[in-house]
Image (cartoon, rainbow, N blue to C red):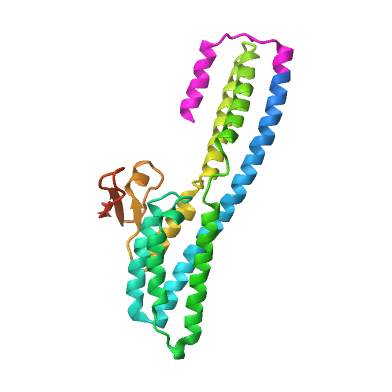
Amino acid sequence: FFLATAAFLALLFVLPSEGFIDSELGGTILTITTFLLGIIAGFYIYITSTDYVHVKDLIANENAGWMSLHRSVSLYHPPAAARLADAMDTYLRRTLDYEIMDYPRNTIAEFDATTTVVRKLPFKPKFASIHQVILGELDAITAARQQLFVLGTKNLSAFSWTVLFALAALVISSLYGLRTGEAFFDIVTVLIGSTIILLFLLIRDLDCYIWNERTFGFEAETQLFQTIGKLPYFPAEAIASGRIHPMESEYRIGTFVRYPESLERTIAVHQSTP
């Protein structure tokens, strides 16, 4: 965003200060392209935000299901609670190693290992009702994952982005072509160009399901780790890129050993200094 703003400011000094296209023609082009950009960008925001909200709800349901499942297993068969917590810990760490849209497809083995612990629970006639609750919770988690499989793709194709960028280029070039030499018009031109970039960043984050990911992704998983008695976990690259800033005094960091040759990670415990 800041680089784009700097580029727009630089263009003020590179391009002629007076308009280099006919005002009537430029006004017509600007009106049409602005209208089309608003319609198409609004439509893209609608479809991406709709799926984003759905994915957010599914992840919340899955996390709530895991919490409830662990609590139910602890009541039903305490000896299996520790094994379930270990399996859940492995699964949850793997989900955080991938983007939201990728983790359902890349954590099948860890998910199966976790569900196996639950399905191997002995049947206790005295606690048959709790056993049925456990199976229902497991089915709900599985259903949420299956829906995430379907939604785990980007809505916008390369062609969709090409249309957006083409319209944005026409709008911005029309604004620069209609400059009057007045400072106010130049400021408006830069602000509109920067706003369009912000709009594109918003659409990208919604399409990749990373908008506000700290709240419904990392923080939700942190609560889940704590529920099963494990330290919170964060991928090292997420911390390095600034996507997450751990607030906990003690947490685990997963670092790639030989990326991209291998996805293996080493886990280290980090303790924040007071």
Q: Please state if 129 lies on the left or on the right of 109 as rendered.
A: right
Q: Residue at x 64, y 23 (%)?
A: 171
How many marks on residues? Answer: 0
Front-most of 149 and 255? 149
- Residue 78's spot in the image, x, y percent? 36, 80
- Residue 99's spot in the image, x, y percent? 44, 49
Front-most of 162 and 216? 162
Residue, far bottom: 126
Front-most of 222 and 267? 267
Q: Residue at x 42, y 72 (%)?
A: 70
Q: Which secondary structure type mostly characterizes the magenta part of the structure?
A: helix
Q: Is residue 126 above or below residue 20?
A: below
Task: Tell me if I can see residue 227 in this picture.
Answer: no
- Residue 112's spot in the image, x, y percent? 40, 66
Residue 67: image quadrant is: bottom left
As for residue 23 lying within the magenta part, the answer is: yes
Which segment did they paint magenta? 1-27
Q: Residue at x 66, y 39 (%)?
A: 42
As for residue 22 lying within the magenta part, the answer is: yes
